[in-house]
Image (cartoon, helix red, strand yellow):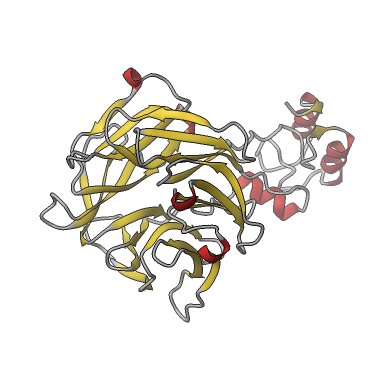
Amino acid sequence: MRNAHSLPSIVTVLLLSSGLASAVCAEASKIYWTTATGQFISQVNADGSGAASAQQSPSGTPIGIDFDEANGKMYWIARNINGLDRVFRGPIDGGTLAEVETLVSTVHGLAGDLVLDLDAGKIYWCAWAGQSPNGGGIYRCNLDGSAAETIVTGLDRPTRLVLHPTLALIYWTDSGNWLIQKASTAGTNLGVATVIPFPNTPEGLAIDFDNGLVYWSEVNTGTIKRATLSGLGIDTVTLVNDLANAGPPRDLGIDFDTGTMYWTDPAHAKIRTSNLAGAGIATLTSAATCVGLAIRFAPEPAPCAGDITGDGLVDGADIAMILGNWGTIGASAFDLNGDGVVDGADLATVLGGWGACP
């Protein structure tokens, strides 16, 4: 799975700017991986416990996975031996095969990966050169499978996808042409550009947009590497090497909020993990066969009304914050009802939420 560093909410930004609370971030809750045989998607908790089967694909070998947490749905793309690749949707926590929907019945080429843009209501997927007369490409459709569009054509083996969280940009690895590239999602073949030239068989991809860093796995060299996303003055750093018996890595996912990398290690039948520097390599779980990987993030907790200090309690410390900023006019972290002034209405919010946050 492909991870972009998520942007904090406006509420979080206000609290951080006031110096009163630390950011409330969604952390990895489960790691999912696809198997090369058996049509299964498996899962394990982020601490390595609770390994189990999560879903079965009606056909084909699952390759890429993404999640619609709010609606309890898991999406995946599956590669079939006869080339009839498909996009499916099913319950996020298992369910029966009868509950799985087929959204796209014939994928162009050989399926590579899938990623969701939930804000725009779109599914993006990539496929290798195969049946498609235009070679490999990147495509999208609505979340219900309708209105399919072509985004990029003429690729060789687009393998993993990452969407920018706010800009209309999509990034991918091309394991055939040995490139990491990007394009605009505003049309077909708009703004196609090379970000990292000639990485050796790049597959997994994760991008920290906040810090301008791109991470990828290389199957041939058995490494995970990092470089600047700008592509100018690239300083490539090898973070993980197969010589440490920790690879060769196949797919890659990163929880940037906790600084944790996860990757599939098919050669050793393991899901591996380490910090962002490649230190502290550990086995998260045994995986029999493993190909694609995805991180499912826990939903961000709703803000607790009146907890200005962010300590999980609505108490006298929060009242003190209101009183200390009484009468402040304009945008403020202490203006809890957003009416432009810190006053009795905000004090009432604190009193109404008194006690421990739920």
Viewer-nearest residue: 207 or 15: 207
For image coordinates 29% across by 31% down, the residue present is 144
Apparent side of residue 38 relative to residue 271 in the rendered image (left or right): left
| 191 vs 20: above or below | below
Report the residue that reaches farthest toward the left. Answer: 133
User: Could you say where residue 114 lies in the image, as x and y percent from the top left?
Assistant: 35, 45
Q: Decide if residue 242 is in sight here.
A: yes
| 12 vs 53: above or below | below
Viewer-nearest residue: 346 or 111: 111
Apparent side of residue 310 relative to residue 139 in the rendered image (left or right): right
**In which quadrant will I find the C terminus?**
top right
User: Could you say where residue 301 lies in the image, as x and y percent from the top left?
Assistant: 64, 34
For image coordinates 89% across by 35% down, the residue present is 316
Q: How many marks?
A: 0
Viewer-nearest residue: 171 or 276: 276
For image coordinates 41% across by 56% down, the residue present is 167
Residue 84 found in image quarter? top left
For image coordinates 37% across by 54% down, the residue present is 160
| 123 vs 93: above or below | below
Viewer-nearest residue: 51 or 354: 51
Q: Decide if residue 330 is in sight here.
A: no
User: Could you say where residue 353 lies in the image, as x and y percent from the top left?
Assistant: 77, 26
User: Could you say where residue 281 lies in the image, as x and y percent from the top left?
Assistant: 62, 56
